[in-house]
Amino acid sequence: MEQVTSADGTTIAYDRLGAGAPLILVAGASCDRQADAGLAASLSAHFTVFNYDRRGRGDSSDTQPFAVDREIEDIGAVLGAAGAGALLVGLSSGAALAARAAAQLPVAGLVMWEPPFTVDDDGLAAARAYTTALTERLAAGDADGAFEAFLRRVGMPDEAIAGARQAPFWAGAVRLAPTLAYDDAALNGGPVPAEVFAGIAVPTVVLAGGASPDSLQAGARAAADAIPGASFAVLEGQTHDADPDALTAAIVPFAAQAAG
């Protein structure tokens, strides 16, 4: 494990593995760097991978008050260790954060895996309801309830949530629950932030799984449509929890193309 210090003094922990051009992984909601260790290992056959703990997770610290700009500064600190020209790979809600960072930082390119943006009125209403529930439960100190709200938001049924409560991962996920607000802020209520994405000037590909729900595929396509020159591709047979080697197989040729 290595560490860098972000602009507000937050310590950001990361693993560096592999060799080649630098690549920074940006995790999604309720994940620390261990959750992406399999993808990091797969990518490390082709890149020098920087797999970091977002603030408030794993071995990274946190500093209040939170703002999305602080997480962009965190990516900037990791970029300082990686070297200018790193490729950003954002996963799920982490893709929304990575895209905001790509609009500001000197990165070589951007890969977005299934950013969960919302494109219809029902979805936007559900996103607003989730924000309200999450905010209320975190304000009340109910981290357990906040994580439950997240699971309901991603479509987990009651019986599955009841089973998850008995699983070993539950306690760790509850500890990360305050950071769910960080991902919700990066998504900004659900719609694609077209005005931000219009400022992304680096090569970009947005990927979705062919076995994922239509809503995730639509959100990913909408993100690609909002970024100048971005491409969109479907990885057939993949769900939101994509196979690391399948993602790597899509990222490697894109990286080569982005490098010119």
Image (spheres, rainbow, N blue to C red):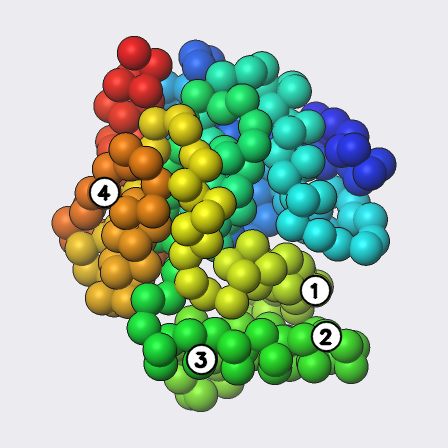
> Could you tell me the amino acid type at mark 1?
Pro
* Comes first in the chain, label 1 or label 3: 3
* Comes first in the chain, label 4 or label 1: 1
Kindly identify the residue that appears in the image at 84 percent across and 36 percent down: 9
Kindly identify the residue that appears in the image at 47 percent across and 74 percent down: 127
Give the Cα distance between marks 1 and 3: 20 Å
The image quadrant where one finds the C terminus is top left
> Mark 1 or 3, which is nearer the eye?
3
Q: Which residue is mark 4?
A: 232
Q: Nearer the viewer, residue 151 or 103?
A: 103
Residue furthest to the bottom in view is 158
- Percent from the top left, x then y, of residue 147? 60, 73
> Could you tell me the amino acid type at mark 4?
Phe
Q: Quadrant of residue 69?
A: top right
Q: Which residue is mark 1?
A: 178
Above or below 223: residue 102: above
The answer to whether mark 2 and mark 4 are in CB contact below 8 A is: no
Kindly identify the residue that appears in the image at 76 percent across and 33 percent down: 6
Q: Secondary structure at mark 4?
A: strand
Q: Which residue is mark 3?
A: 126
The answer to whether mark 1 and mark 2 are in CB contact below 8 A is: yes
> Mark 2 or 3, which is nearer the eye?
3
Q: Secondary structure at mark 3?
A: helix
Residue 83 in view: yes
Give the Cα distance between marks 1 and 2: 7 Å
Left or right of 176, for residue 129: left
* Comes first in the chain, label 2 or label 3: 3
> Could you tell me the amino acid type at mark 2?
Leu
* Comes first in the chain, label 3 or label 4: 3
The answer to whether mark 2 and mark 3 are in CB contact below 8 A is: no
Q: Which residue is mark 2?
A: 138
